[in-house]
Amino acid sequence: MIVEPGELLAAIDSPDDLKKLSEDQLVQLSQELRQFIIDSVSIYGGHFGASLGVVELTVALHYIFNTPYDQLVWDVGHQAYGHKILTGRRDRFPSNRRYNGMSGFPKRSESEYDAFGVGHSSTSIGAALGMAVASEYKGEKDRQHIAVIGDGAMTAGMAFEALNHAGVEKSNLLVILNDNCMSIDPNVGALKEYLTDITTSRTYNKVRDELWNVLGKLSKFGPNPQHIARKVETAMKATLMKQSNLFEALKFRYFGPVDGHDVNHLVTILRDLRSIPGPKLLHCVTVKGKGYALAEKDQTLWHAPGLFDKITGEIHQKVYDKPQPPKYQDVFGHTLVELAEQNPKIMGVTPAMPSGSSMNIMMKAMPNRSFDVGIAEQHAVTFSAGLATQGLVPFCNIYSSFMQRAYDQVVHDVALQNLNVVFCLDRAGFAGADGPTHHGAYDIAYMRCIPNMVVAAPMNESELRNLMYTAQLPDVGPVSIRYPRGEGVMPEWRTPFKKITVGTGRVIREGEGIAILSFGHIGNYAVRATNQLLAEGLEPGHFDMRFAKPLDEEMLHDILSRYKAIVTVEDGCLQGGFGSAILEFMADHGYSVPVKRLGIPDRVVEHGTQDELYKECGFDAAGIAAAVRELAGKVATHVGIETVIL
Ligand SMILES: Cc1ncc(C[n+]2csc(CCOP(=O)(O)OP(=O)(O)O)c2C)c(N)n1
């Protein structure tokens, strides 16, 4: 199905075309852009509410600023669909987030209008500041640098680190705070309350109106509007300072709050701000999901709803005739509550992903024992460490790729002190359509090298439950349990808890010749591969190693003394991962059988479905079977040659 753009939008292939429109036409253009996003996302999927909320802002920014010379940096980038559509990618939009298609996030290699690659939050101010300082250094005084950041993303330390730095630089930086009171779930914390206070404060609104009345007249004052602006500002400073504005305290000029859906007003404001040098912040109040009633009402559900009927709002769900396996995240959520009911020391921690991680199940059942700390992975880890020093057992659930941000905290605050924090790493391995920024590729490697850290991965739901059960037992120390996005394999998943001895694997099947050693859920693909191979007369053994650290040494000695070659399989990076751990063990113990390692190669793997990516990287069932066949062939030839030589 083809989505037809409206009349004005159809003529816009770049911001230059947009600039040909009159200001009066921008309202209609905004409507058309919003409709195009609704039509497209309903058919092709993707993030939804965030882009609808910044339609007017997007139009106004490209109307006023000289992109791509002026640099526009979107935070997270899940709200940049309008930006993509206005910057020459309208026709490619059906390929959004599909294999070999357009990325769902801004990406430098995709367009010169994408000033900075994103996917993780709270980087926009720092990146735009770097660009602004570079422009200053190169003498490009006229160049503008704009960071658009949500109130959710603003809760991160990184955003504040950048604000703190920017306040003392003189470069041209405009931060646009897109305040919709939402993260994916409702935003949390004192900052959110502060922003709400400013938005509703009468004094601020009065000051704001006065400011814009004066600024509106600036253009009539001839060649030096900055001079007038400074005068106005000085006059107003006293009032603003009395309110002890947080951003003013950080030496930003604060403007707003303004209605982020009034495109004509935004155009006026941005035009004025363009001529005010130095760091400044415009506080825009918007509604996530604006213009699609259901999305405005249930903003969390419509953050990324999947495909839906745009008329009825019905979200398409697959219908099955028999019970399906649950998502791993839901097994985590329900199991955590079960364990917490038995063990009063258990606490839950999530950095802004209550729905995404299913921590919301515990937050509902035990609100005093579970915390959404905002988009603050580093803090989530250190906060968990603090809880653990007091004898509590925090389950800190962080997506594998977001955990990268909290690495020092994992090492310094948790592992060096051997604290019993349980890290549950969701979305470990290929994340799918979100692409390389979200692939959880590195955690096996980055966790495995840390002293005291246990590195585990369940092959199914029951194993996840048992690993979680084991991890909360006394004195286990820091544990990392990784599991992928999506469903497991066991419709009947509520199995009784069983303790797993740390560092022990499971025999899936004994065989001869080649042994497949798998780590985590990807082992189910090895089961399928084995079934194909059995039909061909090969008899591989298959072992679910369960721990990348400590390894099951007894099992490995046994396997390596009986099998002629090894295939390792992991949904993680090959460098330093599970297969590397096996190679290290072999080197340390003098084994020299052939090994084929399957996993994520040392390059950026783009987006696609998980199965498309497993296939591309050669560790889907067919890839695993091919590796076994290849090794079986080599081993047979090798034996033949040896026989001849002897
Ligand atoms: C470091 C990091 N942690 C978590 C996420 C997941 N995430 C994506 S969007 C989002 C909410 C962002 O909220 P906000 O900045 O207010 O933007 P809005 O969606 O409201 O427009 C979160 C938590 C992320 N992208 N990066």
Image (cartoon, rainbow, N blue to C red):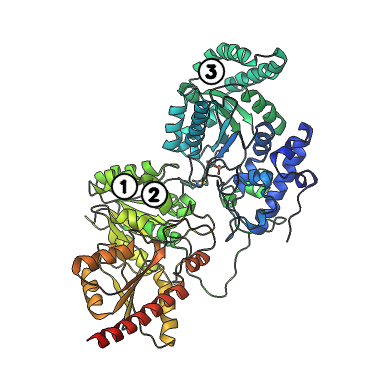
Disc 1 residue lies near ligand 1 with CB under 8 A:
no
244 or 177: which is nearer to us? 177
Q: How many marks?
A: 3
State which tag comes first along the sequence, 3 or 1.
3
- Choose mark 3 or mark 2, whichever is in front: 2
Residue to which mark 2 is pinned: 403
- Choose mark 3 or mark 1, whichever is in front: 1
- Is any part of residue 44 visible from this angle? yes
Q: Please, is residue 196 above or below residue 251 in the view?
A: below
Residue to which mark 3 is pinned: 240
Q: Please, is residue 135 above or below residue 482 in the view?
A: above
Q: What mark, if any, has residue 410 been given in the picture?
A: 1
In contact (CB < 8 Å): disc 1 and disc 2: yes
Distance from disc 1 to disc 2, alpha carbons, whole Å, reads 9 Å
- Element under disc 2: helix
Please rate how many residues cluster around mark 1, counting C-alpha atoms within 10 Å: few if below 14, some from 14 to 19, many from 20.
many
The type of residue carrying mark 2 is: Met
- In the picture, measured across the screen, residue 61 lies left or right of residue 347, that is right
Q: Where is residue 34 in the image (x, y as percent from the top left)?
A: 70, 45
